[in-house]
Image: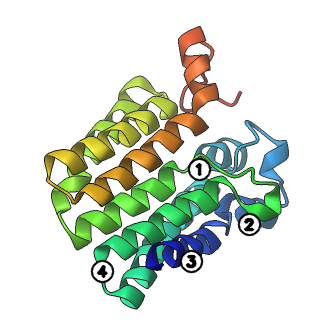
């Protein structure tokens, strides 16, 4: 029962679309500009660095807050992880925006950070190095995002995280790949925009 409750708590928190709120402050509906995605990259490209940073931090904090609240209520890290998974779901599929949200990477970063600081800090190291490193090396944010998502369950497995938590990391990783299917197609076609591009 606690699993469902934590998913619901996380979902409600995740539904607070930072990019949508920041866009409204800038008087821009990000769904109608750039890629149309309610995420950090689109906010950065359309609104600039300040807005992009606000969206990035806000999305990370949604997952961290969901983790902390659920762990405090139920007294277990597993409950916290379910809260973070719910936040990813809410971010990706907000009910009040016709279930069209972001792609969940920043929220996954928050989930990874919460798990790392609560259980094993080593979980965050390979994800950060590979994800951010490849994003800057290739200048493709999507490449870094996908490698970050791929590395999370691998790291959780190698570090001996409990099986249920491992399954949850696999779930959010698979969801990230699904949400990036358009980017994957563009990468294969050679039409994906690089970091810094205004297209």
Cα distance between the residues tagged 4 and 2: 32 Å
Judge whether residue 193 can be spotted in this image. yes
Q: Earlier in the sequence, mark 4 or mark 3?
A: 3
* Horizontal and vertical percent position of residue 106: 49, 54
Q: Earlier in the sequence, mark 3 or mark 2?
A: 3
Q: Residue farthest to the top?
A: 189
* Horizontal and vertical percent position of residue 46: 72, 44
Cα distance between the residues tagged 4 and 3: 15 Å
Depth-wise, is mark 3 or mark 2 nearer the camera?
A: 3
Residue position for label 1: 40
Q: Residue farthest to the front?
A: 1
Q: Residue at x 15, y 45 (%)?
A: 158
Q: Earlier in the sequence, mark 4 or mark 2?
A: 2
* Horizontal and vertical percent position of residue 154: 25, 41
Choose top left, top right, bottom left or bottom right for residue 95: bottom right
Q: Residue at x 60, y 67 (%)?
A: 14
Residue position for label 3: 9
Choose top left, top right, bottom left or bottom right for residue 165: bottom left
Residue position for label 4: 76
Question: Mark 4: which secondary structure?
Answer: loop
What's the mark number on residue 184? none
* Horizontal and vertical percent position of residue 161: 20, 57
What's the mark number on residue 21? 2
The vertical placement of 146 against 100, above or below, is above
Q: Is residue 10 left or right of residue 135?
A: right
Across the whole image, how many numbered discs are drawn on residues?
4
Cα distance between the residues tagged 4 and 1: 30 Å
Q: Dot 3, how many residues are within 10 Å of its Cα: few (below 14), some (14-19), or many (20+)?
A: many
Q: Dot 2, how many residues are within 10 Å of its Cα: few (below 14), some (14-19), or many (20+)?
A: some
Q: Earlier in the sequence, mark 2 or mark 1?
A: 2
Cα distance between the residues tagged 2 and 1: 12 Å
């Amino acid at each position: 029962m606690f699993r469902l409750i934590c998913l619901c708590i996380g979902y409600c928190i995740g539904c607070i679309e930072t990019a949508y709120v920041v866009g409204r402050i800038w008087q821009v509906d990000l769904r109608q500009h750039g890629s149309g995605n309610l995420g950090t990259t689109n906010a950065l490209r359309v609104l600039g660095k300040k807005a992009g940073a606000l969206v990035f931090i806000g999305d990370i904090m949604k997952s961290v807050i969901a983790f902390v609240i659920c762990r405090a209520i139920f007294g277990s890290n597993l409950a916290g992880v379910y809260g973070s998974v719910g936040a990813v779901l809410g971010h990706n599929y907000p009910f009040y925006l016709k279930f069209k949200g972001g792609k969940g990477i920043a929220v996954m970063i928050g989930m990874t950070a919460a798990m790392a600081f609560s259980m094993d800090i080593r979980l965050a190291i390979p994800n950060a190095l590979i994800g951010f490193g490849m994003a800057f090396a290739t200048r493709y944010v999507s490449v870094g995002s996908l490698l970050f998502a791929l590395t999370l369950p691998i790291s959780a497995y190698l570090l001996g995280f409990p099986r249920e938590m491992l399954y949850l990391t696999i779930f959010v990783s698979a969801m990230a790949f699904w949400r990036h299917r358009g980017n994957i197609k563009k990468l294969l076609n050679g039409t994906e925009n690089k970091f810094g591009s205004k297209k």
